Amino acid sequence: MKNVKTNKKVESGQTVTLNYTGKFDNGKVFDSSLTEGREPLHTVVGNGNLIPGFEKGLLGMIKGEKKTINIDPIEGYGEYLKGLVTTVSKTKLPEKVKVGDMLQSQGPKGIMNVTVKEIKENEVIIDANHPLAGKKLIFDLEILKIG
């Protein structure tokens, strides 16, 4: 009898452990599980914890496989929406707020994260888009464990 090795493929509902590196078109890395002090990503595929393009990229991979996927904004963090940029009175924000700060704001659908884009004399421009909205993302993936 032959010893037949089966290569289980990643399917929706399966738990997977993987390493990943996310970068932009210009090669700049924005996130990686390989950063010192970080652990591989451990997740259930299809449970909605990952952006759609990332989950789709994992489907069909086997343990030990490495591949690079390209994710357009629609399958990532969405298109950049100018309507999510607004101006608020400086008096409504913490005193020592600075450009680049991430704050939480009460929106019509609950709490939302906003980024301080610009500070004027009496006003502050804030942006409720995800910091990666509108960007094409590239991920290098390596499946470490399935199940």
Image (cartoon, rainbow, N blue to C red):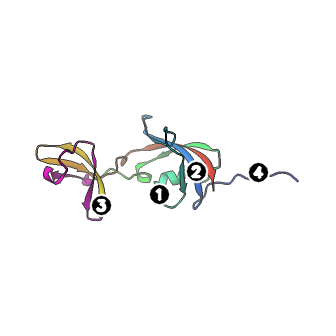
Q: Of marks 1 and 2, which one's residue comes earlier in the chain?
A: 2
- 92 on left or right of 132: left
Q: Residue furthest left?
A: 122
Residue type at mark 4 is: Lys
- 70 on left or right of 86: right
Label 2, residues with CA under 10 Å away: few <14, some 14-19, many ≥20: some
Q: Quarter-wise, where is residue 44 in the image? A: bottom right
Which residue is disc 3 drawn over?
111
Q: In 3D space, how far apart are the residues under numbered discs 2 and 4 (Cα atoms)?
A: 20 Å
Label 1, residues with CA under 10 Å away: few <14, some 14-19, many ≥20: few
Q: Position of residue 119 (x, y in %)?
A: 18, 43
- 67 on left or right of 121: right
- 134 on left or right of 95: right
Which residue is disc 4 drawn over?
5
Q: In 3D space, how far apart are the residues under numbered discs 4 and 3 (Cα atoms)?
A: 49 Å
Residue type at mark 2 is: Thr
Q: Of marks 2 and 4, which one's residue comes earlier in the chain?
A: 4
Q: Of marks 1 and 3, which one's residue comes earlier in the chain?
A: 1
Picture layout, residue 109 above or below residue 60: below
Q: Looking at the rendered structure, which numbered label has been put on residue 49? A: 1
Q: Looking at the rendered structure, which numbered label has been put on residue 17? A: 2
Q: In 3D space, how far apart are the residues under numbered discs 1 and 2 (Cα atoms)?
A: 14 Å
Q: Residue furthest right?
A: 1
Q: Which span of residues is magenta-colored?
A: 82-109
